[in-house]
Image: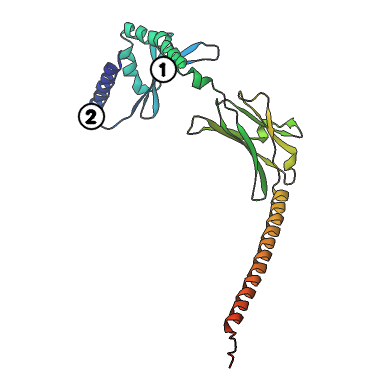
Amino acid sequence: MDPGARRALLALLLLRTVAALGRPPQSHTLQVILGCEVQEDNSTRGFWKYGYDGQNHLEFCPETLDWRAAEPKAQATKLEWEVNKIRAKQNRAYLERDCPEQLQRLLELGRGALDRQVPPLVKVTHHVASAVSTLQCQALNFYPRNITMKWLKDRQPLDAKDVELKDVLPNGDGTYQGWVALAVPPGEERRYTCQVEHPGLDQPLTASWEPPVPGTLLTGVIGGIAVGVILFFIGILFRILRKRQASRGALGDYVLAECT
């Protein structure tokens, strides 16, 4: 059944339902998911599903050439669509033949972009809130999406239940970012290491938190000394200029005596 005819049929069924219930027409939402995907073993899987008002409604089963009703009010549509077996075979042909062929052509067109590998930029940050010390490992700007992030304690992997589940989110430029967090005892942060594995990396990448206090202190001391030296020279220059101005004023007040 072509999409236009299917939409018309659904609209007719909805009108029938409204008329049967004796209620005035109301707004409803009809959603469809139609397509196919390539599995890791290069096999394909098709799907054709309908949703009604945010709930699962109907799903096409290519193996049996029928529709599976997800709720009682979908039974009427299911029975009417299953009358014509030719249309059911056409649906199956699209999911098992036409859709995979179209998908393969699209994959070939985008092969260069899809096959690129961008390694992640990894950093570990430290956060303290309510006397709880948390380490957060961030992997930034990587592609493809699949990435493995885990924590090591004294170079040994931690149990997954001790680690906050990671979240991988898309960036606006087509890359991804991910993070994984871990609560640790205060003072033991240096014992933990974040290990990241990604197709763009030749080998697993590890990163740990580096306390910023020594570097910050050294920078502050150097900055303080530099400011002190600058102020010292500015003071000397100011005194020199004051003395020169005073000398010029004294010369202006001196008048040679006239010879009589």
**Which of disc 1 and disc 2 is earlier in sequence?**
2
Where is the N terminus found, in terms of image quarters? top left
For image coordinates 65% across by 35% down, the residue present is: 163
Q: Residue furthest bottom?
A: 260
Image side of residue 94 versus residue 165, left or right: left
Horizontal placement of 34 versus 2: left or right? right
Residue 210 is at least partly visible in this image = yes
Q: Disc 2 versus disc 1: distance between alpha carbons?
A: 37 Å
| Residue that sits furthest to the right in the current view | 154
Q: Position of residue 153 (x, y in %)?
A: 74, 35
Q: Nearer the viewer, mark 2 or mark 1?
A: 1
Q: Nearer the viewer, residue 96 or 233?
A: 233
Residue 194 visible from this viewpoint: no
Residue neighbourhood size for the residue with mark 1, other residues' Cα within 10 Å, grouped as few (<14), some (14–19), many (≥20): some
Mark 1: which amino acid?
Gly
Residue 226 locus on image (x, y percent): 68, 58
Q: Residue 235, percent across and down? A: 66, 68
**x then y, percent, for residue 258:** 58, 90
Q: Is residue 236 left or right of residue 26?
A: right
Front-most of 138 and 73? 138
Q: Farthest residue toward the front? A: 260
Q: Which residue is the site of mark 1?
A: 35
Q: Residue at x 75, y 31 (%)?
A: 156
Query: How many C-alpha atoms fall within 10 Å of the one at disc 2: few (<14), some, or many (≥20)?
Result: few
| Residue 198 position (above or below residue 6) | below
In the rendered structure, which amino acid carries the disc numbered 2? Gly
Report the side of 247 relative to 16 (left or right).
right
Please name the residue shown 60% across and 77% down the image: 248
